[in-house]
Image: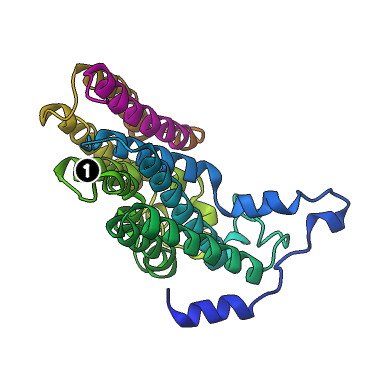
Amino acid sequence: MPTVALQKAVLDDRPTRPSSSLDGVRAPSRWRRYLDLTKPKVVALISFTALVGALLARPESHRLDLLAWGVFGIALAAASAAALNHVLDRHIDAKMSRTRGRPLPAGELTTRSALSFAILLGVCSMWILVTRVNLLTAGLSLLSLIGYAAIYTLWLKHATAQNIVIGGAAGAAPPVLGWAAVTGSVDPNALLLFLIVFVWTPPHFWALAIARRDEYARAGVPMLPVTRGVAHTQLQVLLYTVLLCIVTLLPYLTGMSGLAYLGASLILNARFLYYAWALVIRPSPQLPMRIFRFSITYLMWLFAALLVDRCLLGTLA
């Protein structure tokens, strides 16, 4: 992360809005606000995909301690990146109704304390991954953290409407990290899991961007529906969903998974494709957020299907 940005974050230690407790509303407990900094729902999904990646890796021997430390270290790295994102995006968050209640724009934590918390999480993550797991996982996790917290948040997010496509590489890393944690290597199947999450990211996030396009416009963030319009973004959601349907067939076509996964992926893809098609031919104000929420469930069940399929094949032992 650039030194100038860190110095600015440390020096700008004033809350942007009075705490809600001053308005007669009981403020959330302090530990809960620190937890909010980590985006726990996002970290839970990241940890799950990392866990599935580790369990699909088929190492010669399954060491539960290595698996546990690996997923825990990856989760801490993701939490650190999320907290850094809160620090770096605090002024943008204050301009958007979806995010102005976050701890920093709400004035419930200072920038200094949030930054210190993020650094502590990152240091703990690297210590665990280096000493308890392996250097490959630590290095890849560090690159992912920097890619999201610095390259995407500081540069890509404000530089191009394709920000989420390019920056999606950082968010797609967890299955590869889980794989590397238990094997010490990365093979083509791990990269296939990466590809699935990478292609999933644009239709997932652009659905949210359509729903919140006015807020992104006010905040000066060049998301695709702001720069190219809603109709163009709707078409892109459909096209990426079609591509996602093709990519998610690859685990079956390459022999990585079997019929159980194939059946689940076809059902999930059919629903995702239906939503994306409806977004183009008969859009409604509620549909983008419906797609956004479904896409989270979609990814969770898709990776669960990969794991269940492997269990049914008797290769997890």
State the image coordinates of residue 139 (x, y, percent, origin top left).
31, 62
Q: Nearer the viewer, residue 4 or 232?
A: 4
State the image coordinates of residue 236 (x, y, percent, origin top left).
29, 44
Image colouring: rainbow
Q: Quadrant of residue 270?
A: top left
Taking the magenta stretch, the answer to whether it contains residue 296 is: yes
Magenta stretch bounds: 290-317
The residue lying at 31 percent from left, 39 percent from top is 54
Is residue 259 shown to the viewer in this render? yes
Q: Nearer the viewer, residue 151 or 112?
A: 112
State the image coordinates of residue 196 (x, y, percent, origin top left).
26, 40
The residue lying at 48 percent from left, 53 percent from top is 76
State left or right for residue 109 relative to residue 295.
right
Please, is residue 56 above or below residue 175 in the view? above
The residue lying at 86 percent from left, 58 percent from top is 22
The C terminus sits in image quarter: top left
State the image coordinates of residue 66 (x, y, percent, origin top left).
36, 44
Taking the magenta stretch, the answer to whether it contains residue 89 is: no
Is residue 89 shown to the viewer in this render? no
Q: Which residue is mark 1?
A: 190
